[in-house]
Each structure stands twice: as C-alpha cells, then as structure tokens.
Image: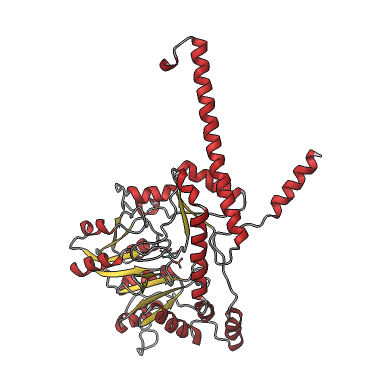
C-alpha cells in the first residue's frame, strides 16, 4: 500500500509542469509575417520588415532613427564606438548589470569605471557618479535594471556639466517611462534587446536608437562590415561588424510590437499580484520590488526577490526548483568577474550594495504566458519554502539548546558558564 502511494506521488510530481522564468507569446501576426518572408524569399537582412521594424519601434519610443541589429550586446558594441569612445578613454557604468556594457567598453580599448548600486531600485547610484569623473571620462552607460528606470535627470545634468556622452541601455525596458517619457529616448544613443525573455522578442535581436542622422548612418555602416555607402564595394576604411538583423527576426518584431501594450499590461498585473500575495515575505526579511517611485511605476520586467541572506536564498531557490518552478540568479557584479580580474581590472574594488544584491537576489517566473494557477503555485511554494526554513532553523536551535542543557546537567556546571 505504502509503495503504491509513494509511486502515485512520484507520478503526480512527474506530471507537474515546469513554470519557466519567462515564456513567449506568439498569438498575433507572427506566423503570417514569417510566412511572408519564407514565401517571398526575403530571409536575410535585405527585406522589408527590417526597415518597417526600425521605423515603427523608433516611433514607439519617440526617437527619430532606429538601427536593427542581431542582439542587445551587438547594439552596445556599436553604440560605444558611435559615441566616439576610443582607446584609453574611461566610461562610467554600474557594477551590477549584465557583462555586455563592460565588454563593449573593453573591446573599444577603453576602461570601464564602476559605480555601486542604489539599494532600492538596484540601478547605478547617481550620487557616486561625479566622484568617478576624470579628464579621461568620455561617456556614461546608464542601465535600467529589472523594472524601474534609473533616475536619469541628475545623470543627464552631470553629463551636460562634464560634456560626456550618455549611452542608455534600455535592453529590459520596452514601454517603461521616466516622468512620462519613454525609456530609450534619453541618451545620446540608446539600445534595446529583443532576446526571448524581453517584453517583445525577435528570438535574438537588438536596436540602436538616436536622433542624429550622422550617428545613425555610422551605426548602419558598422553593423554591415563597415561597407562604405556609395563607395567602391569591397574597400573598407574602418573596422566593422556583421550584426545585421534578418528579415525573419524583424517580421517577429513587427508582429510583437503590435501587441506591446497588452504585454506590458500583463507584466504589470503579474507584478501587482505577486506584490500583494507575497507581502508576507517582508516579515521574513525579504525585499520585494518597489511598485512606484516619484518618476515611474514598476514595469516588472523581472519580479525580483532579495533574501535576508545567501543561505536563505539558496534554500528558497532549491525548494522552488525541486517543485518545478524556475528561478534566475541576479547578475554577478563586474568587479567580481574572473574574466576581468584576470586582466587586472577591478581587483581591489568593493561595491557593497551590488555585492549584496548579487549574493541574495533572484527572480521568479513572470512570463507573459503565465496563468493564475501558476502564479498561485509560485506563491504557495514560496510560503512553504520560507516556513520550511523557519522550522529547520527552530529545530536546530532547539537541538543546540538541549545539547547545552545536557552538558550543564552532566558536568554539573551552571548554565550561564557553558
Ligand atoms: C541590461 C541589459 N543590457 C544588455 C543586454 C544584452 O542583450 P542581448 O542578450 O540581446 O545581447 C541585456 C540582456 O539581457 C541586459 O539585460
């Protein structure tokens, strides 16, 4: 009988569907537009959807020009060069972010200068930036992290004061606004990613946006092996890249863009639901995302949790994963990256807020396709995980106390001396 019940439980657990951290929603014109590419034979970068996507997305963000590329990282590679960053320059960026901006700076021969994070929004701490500016500083990469924009007005004021370029990394921030204006419309150049986990996706993909025609043409040249527009075909004057977006990727992008407002609405509804149903976590020392700041409402690209310590994070993540709920670790800070330390970069640096975020933070499923039942499953499992940890901790404490009392009795020693 016992074996029978055990077997049933095993089968039931096997049948539970995994809840991914993110999932895609292709319920619009994706198939139709992709079929058009296949039927017409326009499958490479040459094809009508690329320009259509550039025009429509730049208009949506409120910028004059868009340059579609193969990823958000490629967009950063090009944006850094187009911003005029050269060998020996310094570029200020947050330590707590994805590795892409640091790589772009280093590949341009320049030096990343790291700034710690704001403990509430996880974005770069604006107050630390001015101290990092030197005569070698050429630009600031302003990254918006997880759902709340960086407080960009004071950053723009600093850039103006010191004549620095601003590259705005809005990779995660489709449709988010700062004081009512779209993120991605602030930097001299801004970039987006359309990787599969982003609000709208092209599978892999990215876009550079700006308002300056000359910079736009330079970006277009750089993405296409630096072929000279109108020049002799195979004569090149500059180092270029092949990071062209295909017509098929752009077809997905156009279809996804048609649905962006409903995607954002869903993201915000998921964030609101979790914030309401997970508020008990605050009593156990967890940090939940801030719903709103003076300049923006959270768009919850990722729904983040910061545990009270790394042990509790590990327990929680393992518990969720065992129960088929996927999670994703927070970024690891740039100054803690072995690849950079091996290059003798950032070796003696300490950025305590970023370090704490990296050690204790993770995010839980919030894909556009997630169902109400799945959200509830995440909430219930988080409750079980936190209470489980508490019971283990209580048992350990009880065991320790009994052991101490036992020693006191055996050795006939007053308890306070043990
Ligand atoms: C803030 C940020 N910048 C840049 C990138 C790089 O984008 P991609 O993965 O498309 O190269 C990402 C990717 O997630 C990101 O989160």
Quarter of the image where one finds residue 117:
bottom left
Where's residue 72, x and y in %? Answer: 43, 69
Is 87 or 403 nearer to us in this picture? 403
Q: In the image, is 13 to the left or to the right of 335?
A: right
Which residue is pictured at 32% across the width and 69% down the height? Answer: 167
Question: What colour scheme has been applied to the protein in the rendered image?
Answer: secondary structure
Q: Quadrant of ligand 1?
A: bottom left
Q: In the image, is 309 to the left or to the right of 394?
A: left
Is 145 or 409 nearer to us in this picture? 409
Marker count (numbered): 0
Q: In the image, is 91 to the left or to the right of 272?
A: left
Is 91 or 108 nearer to us in this picture? 91
Quarter of the image where one finds residue 121:
bottom left
Where's residue 290, x and y in %? Answer: 41, 57
Does residue 305 lie above or below 210 as drawn? above
Where's residue 125, x and y in %? Answer: 30, 57
Which residue is pictured at 22% across the width and 65% down the height? Answer: 158
Q: Quadrant of the C terminus?
A: top left
List the single residue furthest toward the right. Answer: 1
Where's residue 368, x and y in %? Answer: 55, 67
Residue 224 at least partly seen: no
Quarter of the image where one finds residue 81:
bottom left
Does residue 197 lie above or below 276 as drawn? below
List the single residue furthest toward the top. Answer: 412
Which residue is pictured at 49% across the width and 14% down the height? Answer: 408
Which residue is pictured at 80% across the width and 43% down the height? Answer: 4
Does residue 205 lie above or below 325 as drawn? below
Does residue 403 lie above or below 87 as drawn? above
Is 333 or 21 nearer to us in this picture? 21
Residue 35 at least partly seen: yes
Q: In which quarter of the image is the N terminus?
A: top right
List the single residue furthest toward the bottom. Answer: 230
């Amino acid at each position: 009988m016992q074996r029978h019940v055990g077997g049933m439980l095993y089968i039931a657990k096997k049948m539970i569907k995994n809840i991914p951290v993110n999932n895609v929603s292709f319920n619009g014109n994706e198939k139709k537009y992709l079929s058009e590419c296949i039927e017409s034979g326009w499958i490479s970068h040459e094809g009508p959807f690329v320009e259509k996507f550039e025009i429509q997305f730049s208009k949506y963000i409120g910028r004059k020009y868009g340059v579609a590329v193969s990823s958000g990282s490629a967009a950063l590679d090009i944006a850094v060069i187009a911003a005029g960053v050269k060998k020996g320059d310094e570029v200020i960026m947050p330590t707590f972010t994805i590795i892409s901006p640091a790589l772009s700076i280093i590949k341009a021969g320049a030096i990343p200068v790291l700034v710690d994070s704001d403990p509430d929004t996880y974005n770069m701490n604006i107050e630390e930036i001015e101290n990092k500016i030197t005569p070698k500083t050429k630009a600031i990469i302003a990254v918006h992290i997880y759902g709340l924009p960086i407080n960009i007005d004071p950053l723009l004021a600093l850039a103006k004061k010191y004549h620095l370029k601003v590259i705005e990394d809005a990779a995660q921030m489709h449709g988010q606004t700062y004081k009512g204006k779209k993120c991605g419309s602030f930097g001299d150049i801004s970039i987006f990613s359309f990787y599969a986990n982003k609000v709208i996706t092209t599978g892999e993909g990215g876009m550079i946006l700006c308002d300056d025609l000359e910079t736009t043409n330079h970006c277009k040249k750089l993405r296409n092996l630096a072929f000279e527009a109108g020049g002799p075909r195979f004569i090149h004057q500059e180092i270029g890249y092949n990071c062209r977006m295909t017509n098929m990727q752009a077809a997905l992008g156009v279809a996804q863009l048609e649905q962006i407002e409903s995607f954002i609405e869903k993201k915000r509804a998921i964030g609101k639901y979790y914030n309401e149903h997970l508020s008990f976590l605050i009593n156990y020392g967890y940090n939940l995302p801030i719903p709103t700041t003076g300049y923006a409402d959270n768009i919850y690209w990722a729904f983040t949790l910061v545990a009270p310590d790394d042990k509790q994070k590990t327990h929680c993540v393992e518990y969720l994963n065992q129960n088929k709920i996927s999670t994703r670790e927070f970024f690891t800070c740039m100054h803690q990256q072995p690849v950079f330390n091996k290059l003798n970069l950032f070796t003696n640096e300490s950025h305590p807020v970023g370090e704490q975020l990296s050690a204790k933070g993770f995010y839980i499923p919030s894909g556009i396709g997630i169902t109400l039942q799945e959200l509830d499953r995440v909430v219930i499992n988080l409750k079980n995980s936190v209470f489980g940890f508490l019971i283990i901790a209580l048992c350990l404490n009880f065991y320790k106390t009994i052991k101490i009392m036992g020693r006191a009795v055996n050795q006939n020693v007053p308890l306070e001396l043990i």
